[in-house]
Amino acid sequence: MTDRTEQLIREAFAAEADRAPDPRTVLAGLARAPRRRHGMTLLAAGVAVVAVVAIAVAAFVVPKALDRGAPPASGGAGVDQTVLLAGLDRSIYTDAIMLAKVRADGSTSVVSLPRDSWVSVPGHGKQRLNAVYARFGLPELMETVHRLTGVRVDHYALMDMAGFGELADVVGGVPVCLRAATTDSRTGVSFPVGEQTVSGAKALAFLRQRIGLPNGDLDRIARQQAFLRSLAGVLRAHPDTLSVALDVVRDRARLDPKWDLLGLAAQLRGPGAGRMRFATVPFAGELVDPDVGTVLDLDPATVSAFVTSAFGDGKGAGSATPEPGGEKSTSDCVN
């Protein structure tokens, strides 16, 4: 069978760049639309540029795939760029919010911003971070993140959370590890202690659970980071699953139409390709607002200093993505 890797990468990027409707309208329609079925064809496909999956797939799979042919055309040498990554629920509130920095050398750092952060929204006062996009729109969310972190957002990638369960399904499951057995009283879904593989609805339940976890939403963030690290390892170890993963991304994601995706793919072939670190911004404590309930108190100066350190050279606070197939230690498990 002829290897069409590079051609498919170009076609996938071109298709994404041409589609630029309002992401909120598209995602509202996706919540009502039937899910597509995907054939497990052994096509070596392109890059899934969405949320952290975008960076993970590009960092781990594209460099190897593109080495078989000429590098894709791009606008020039790679430059540092920041990407706002958001996972949306059915009502387009942001269940997961991350800010990633892709460096010119191809290395990546990702910081999670807790959904319950109490933040200042330009022109709208204090709001819970997860409500900013749904109530005020994408520009307001990008500017809010900029003011909180001190980092200007260059691009965005949005994906509805159900897509992550579907991604886990089409790649044959994502390995995770729990320190203790848990049950979500809201959904009734239970997870045993130790290593296990999640897919489909159970993967989505794993990513969204916070009820019954010792640290609530902070443990959910740790789960999201662990899931994405593991998914990156699966895609790197089994690149034959990339074509169906890309199909899911095309169905579920909305990307910045101004993003030079071919340039990103070329950049992620650099000497730092495959180096990815995750971290979560610190908060000062909890506050109770009479209208929205308990929220997290963040000091912008502290958050900005933390993000600057994490984004500085890729060796700051956070956990690195392990090689796929490596043995898990107790520290790799989450609540």
Image (cartoon, helix red, strand yellow):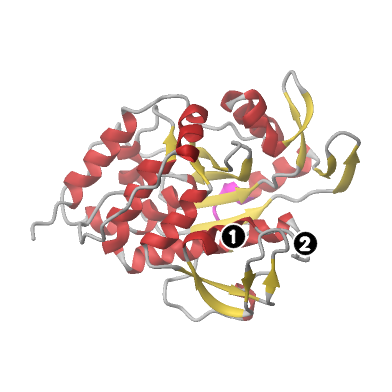
Which residue, given by chain and number where applicable, does mark 1 sit on? 205
- Foreground residue among 241 and 229: 241
- Our reading of the magenta stretch's main secondary structure is helix
Q: Secondary structure at mark 1?
A: helix
Which residues lie in the magenta part?
310-314
* Residue displayed at 58% across by 31% down: 152
Q: Is residue 148 magenta?
A: no
Query: Does the rendering let one see residue 320?
Result: no
Count up the numbered dots: 2
The kind of residue tagged 2 is Asn
316 to the left or right of 257: right
As drawn, 277 above or below 230 = above
* Residue displayed at 33% across by 34% down: 16
Which residue, given by chain and number where applicable, does mark 2 sit on? 215
| x then y, percent, for residue 326 | 46, 78
| x then y, percent, for residue 122 | 72, 22
| Residue 325 sits in quarter | bottom left
198 to the left or right of 94: left
Q: Earlier in the sequence, mark 2 or mark 1?
A: 1
Q: Secondary structure at mark 2?
A: loop
